[in-house]
Structures are given as C-alpha cells and as structure tokens.
Image (cartoon, grey):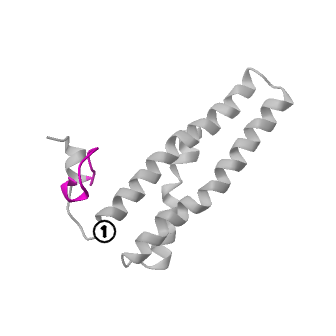
C-alpha cells in the first residue's frame, strides 16, 4: 500500500504495465506524471546551480565564476524544451494556451528555489 501522497498522485512502479498505474484515475493521468517528473527533475538542477555559486565563497577564482555562469546558462537553455514538454501534452488534453504555458513555467519555478 502506498502512502497518502502516493494514493493521490498517479505513479507507476518499475516493471509494471501502464494499466497497473496507481493514484487517482483521470483522463490526463499521463500528463500529470510528466509534469511531476519534470518538476522533480528540476530540483537537483537548481541545487547544482546553487552549489556552483556557493563554491565561490570558498574559491573566489575567476574560473569558478565562469564555470558557475556556464552551468547556469546551460541549464537555462535546456529548460526551454522541458517547458515545452510540459505545455504541449497539457494543451493536447484541452488546457488553454495560456494555462498550458503557465504550467510549463511553474514546473521550472522549483529550480531557483532549490538554488537558493
């Protein structure tokens, strides 16, 4: 039996077919899984940026700053397709363009929070 959170959020255990997914059954269950997966994926990315800039306190060399900036730019650039990967399925499920776009943006808001 899953925890309370597991009973609400759709999820699939390793090795099981999609028909055995647990959680609340909705017509957009796969889209919710995708949004949650990308949002959770963004937390360690934010932590990586935070650590990169945090090392400047111990090692204030220009190479460290350049590396932190390069990492930030790289992660920022790859967030564009991630936002699209969230927005397009939501749009397909019937969300308005603005709502799908906003959810795509919100999936990435965890990064700056994790960076701090």
Q: Residue at x 52, y 39 (%)?
A: 44
Q: Which residue is mark 1?
A: 28
Q: Is residue 74 above or below residue 87?
A: above
Q: Residue at x 81, y 25 (%)?
A: 60
Is 108 covered by the magenta stretch? Answer: no
Q: Which residues are magenta?
A: 9-22
Give the farthest residue toward the right: 62
How packed mark 1 is, by other alpha carbons closer than 10 Å (few <14, some 14-19, many 20 or more), is few
**Quarter of the rendering occupied by the C terminus:** top right
Coordinates of residue 101 in the picture (x, y in percent) = 51, 70
Specify the principal SS of the magenta part.
Answer: loop
Q: Nearer the viewer, residue 109 or 79?
A: 79
Give the farthest residue toward the top: 58
Q: Nearer the viewer, residue 108 or 77?
A: 77
Give the farthest residue toward the left: 1
Name the side, left or right, on which 108 lies relative to 13: right
Q: Residue at x 73, y 24 (%)?
A: 57
Q: Is residue 58 above or below residue 21?
A: above
Coordinates of residue 9 in the picture (x, y in percent) = 27, 53
Coordinates of residue 1 in the picture (x, y in percent) = 14, 40
| Label 1 secondary element | loop
Q: How many marks?
A: 1
């Amino acid at each position: 039996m899953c925890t309370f959170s597991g009973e609400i959020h759709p999820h699939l255990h390793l090795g099981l077919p999609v028909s055995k997914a647990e959680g609340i059954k909705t017509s957009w269950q796969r889209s919710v899984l995708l949004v949650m997966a990308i949002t959770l994926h963004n937390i360690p990315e934010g932590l990586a940026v935070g650590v990169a800039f945090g090392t400047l306190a111990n090692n204030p060399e220009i190479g460290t700053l350049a590396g932190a900036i390069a990492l930030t730019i790289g992660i920022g650039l790859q967030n564009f397709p991630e936002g699209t990967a969230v927005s397009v399925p939501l749009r397909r499920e019937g969300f308005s363009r603005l709502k799908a776009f906003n959810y795509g943006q919100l999936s990435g808001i965890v990064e700056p929070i994790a960076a701090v």
